[in-house]
Amino acid sequence: MQGVEHQSVGLERRGRGDGEAWRRHGNGGAQSERLTSGLGWFSIGLGVAELLAPRAVARGIGLRGRGPTPALTRLCGLRELAAGVGILSQRRPSAWMWSRVAGDVMDLALLASGFAARGTNRARLAAATAAVAGVTVVDAVCAQRLTDRGRLSVQTTPEGARRVRRRITVNRPPDALYRFWRDFANAPRFMERVEAVQTTGERRTHWRARGPGGVTVEWDAEVTEDRPNELIAWRSLDAPFRHSGVVRFEPAPAGRGTVVTVEMEYAPPGGVLTATAAKLIGSAPEQQIQEDLRRFKQFLETGLVVVAQPPASSSRSIAAGGAR
């Protein structure tokens, strides 16, 4: 009982802390997008310089005499241009970011070989090598973040609660996504297990959903922070299992839609055993969040939600109001 009490207290504090604690813990989706975009433009700028002025680039980093030939420098420029265009044109450019990391390693090898060449300005070359090493670290961190961004993150807090985070990019503007989500009557359209949501106050709603085994579950929830077009934070008031969370809507760079991030923290009623059992039968909240976000993206981008049902009922049209 003491463990459950600690879990409830932790969730209560997080709920009352509005969205600030959630932003400190999980914010960064848009920052990662901006960093990725910046690295893409950096690749293009460097590639153009290497293509148009290969000898000047070599002299600038201290390589003379038997340094890289202009042809080799131009090849590196083509590689940088390809990576930059790939990063800026793809919605999920993790592969192109990893190609930058591979290119950085090649550049470091070329720079290292330059120390043995005659006429090398070792001070400039050492500074250039240090700069490339720093960029390599940034590229690797950015590439790893992009790789992890589409994954489901699940952690267990010291109190035994489960903390879930999932991020997805939707090709719609933040205000449209915020308005749709903020109208909680829309929840059954993309939340598979939610049957109905009733507004009971300015910031309170009553939810009815299907639990494991088809059992009906009901609870009340309260919006703890509401920032139009930016975030909605909530906490449960009397749910069978206590939970709190936040959904954020952050503009993606280059007008590529909106980064939607959902984070939730919950305390499984029966602890780790119950959480494991729920996961085995596909009813864990983290699994449902992942599926619901997929449906949210489909619904907002196409007006349809594809479900695993016979062809006659395999989708619901937005024109039909998402009727079940």
Image (spheres, rainbow, N blue to C red):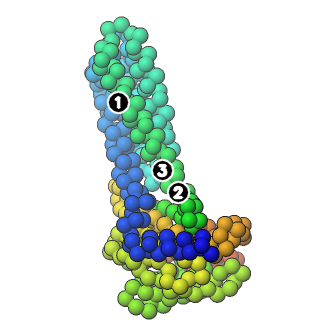
Q: Residues within 10 Å of mark 3 (few under 14, many from 20)?
A: many
Using the numbered discs, state the Cα–Cα distance from disc 2 to disc 1 in whole angstroms.
Answer: 30 Å
Question: In which quarter of the view is residue 17 placed?
Answer: bottom left
- Residue under label 3: 146
Judging depth in this view, the residue of 94 and 232 nearest the camera is 232
The N terminus lies in which quarter of the figure?
A: bottom right
Give the residue type that dot 1 points to.
Ala
Res. 132 visible in picture: yes
- Res 171 quadrant in image: bottom left
Disc with the residue nearer the chain's start (1 vs 3): 1
Give 196 or 41, whichever is nearer the viewer: 196
Q: Say which residue appears at 42% left-offset and 65% top-offset.
A: 22
Q: Residue at x 45, y 64 (%)?
A: 261
Examine the image and state in which quarter residue 278 appears.
bottom right
Classify 197 as above or below 173.
Answer: below
- Residue at 40% x, 91% y is 201
Question: Residue 268: where, in percent of width, then height?
Answer: 62, 72
Q: Is residue 120 above or below residue 148?
A: above
Residue at position x 49%, y 33% in the image: 102
| Residue bearing mark 1 | 131
Q: Secondary structure at mark 3?
A: helix
Q: Position of residue 203 (x, y in %)?
A: 39, 85
Element carrying mark 2:
loop
Residue under numbered circle 2: 150
Residue 65's x, y, as percent? 34, 9
- The type of residue carrying mark 2 is Gly
Quadrant including the C terminus: bottom right
Question: Foreground mark, 2 or 1?
Answer: 1
On the rendered structure, is 269 left or right of 33? right
Residue 82 visible at all: no
